[in-house]
């Protein structure tokens, strides 16, 4: 039995945004704190990857 490529889930499926109308103020504050922590984590990963890329570029330039 063959499968269709359309049946596969996309690798980077976009998450559906949360319905903020259903959240109370405390929940919204917690959500903001979680999102800020995630942003910090992603920014740290970007810096690390940039550092590795720079080191590799210097190594291979020699």
Image: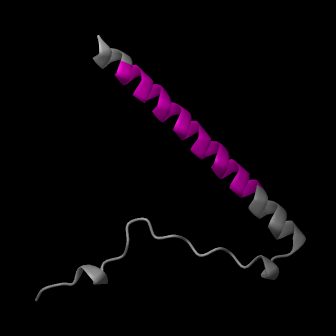
State how many labels appear: 0
Quadrant occupied by the N terminus: bottom left
Q: Is residue 13 left or right of residue 36?
A: left
- x and y percent of residue 42 in the render? 58, 45
Residue at (81, 81) in percent of width and height: 21
Q: Quadrant of residue 11?
A: bottom left
Q: Is residue 35 left or right of residue 41?
A: right
Asked which quadrant contains residue 26, the reply is bottom right
Based on the picture, tell me whether residue 12 belongs to the magenta stretch.
no
Q: Does residue 41 lie above or below 34 as drawn? A: above
Residue 60, image x and y in percent?
29, 18
Magenta highlight: main SS? helix
Is residue 40 or residue 6 the one in the foreground? 6
**Taking 50 as reference, is 56 above or below it?**
above
For image coordinates 24% across by 79% down, the residue present is 5
Where residue 59 sits in the image (x, y, percent)?
A: 32, 16
Q: Furthest-left residue in view?
A: 1
Judge left or right: residue 35 versus residue 2. right
Q: Is residue 61 above or below residue 37?
A: above
The image shows residue 23 at horizontal and vertical percentages of 81, 77
Among all residues in the image, which is located at the extreme bottom?
1
- Way the structure is coloured: one colour
Point out the image quarter for the C terminus: top left
Magenta stretch: residue 55 in it? yes
What stretch of residues is rendered in magenta? Answer: 33-57
- State the residue in front, 53 or 18: 53
Q: Furthest-top residue in view?
A: 62
Residue furthest to the right in view is 25
Residue depicted at x 69% and y 49%: 37
Question: Which residue corresponds to the image point at 82% horizontal and 67% vertical from the top-left?
Answer: 28
């Amino acid at each position: 039995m063959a499968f269709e490529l359309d049946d596969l889930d996309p690798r980077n499926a976009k998450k559906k945004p949360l319905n903020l109308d259903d959240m109370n103020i405390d929940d919204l504050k917690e959500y903001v704190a979680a999102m800020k922590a995630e942003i910090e984590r992603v920014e740290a990963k970007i810096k690390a990857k940039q550092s590795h890329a720079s080191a590799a570029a210097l190594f291979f330039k020699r």
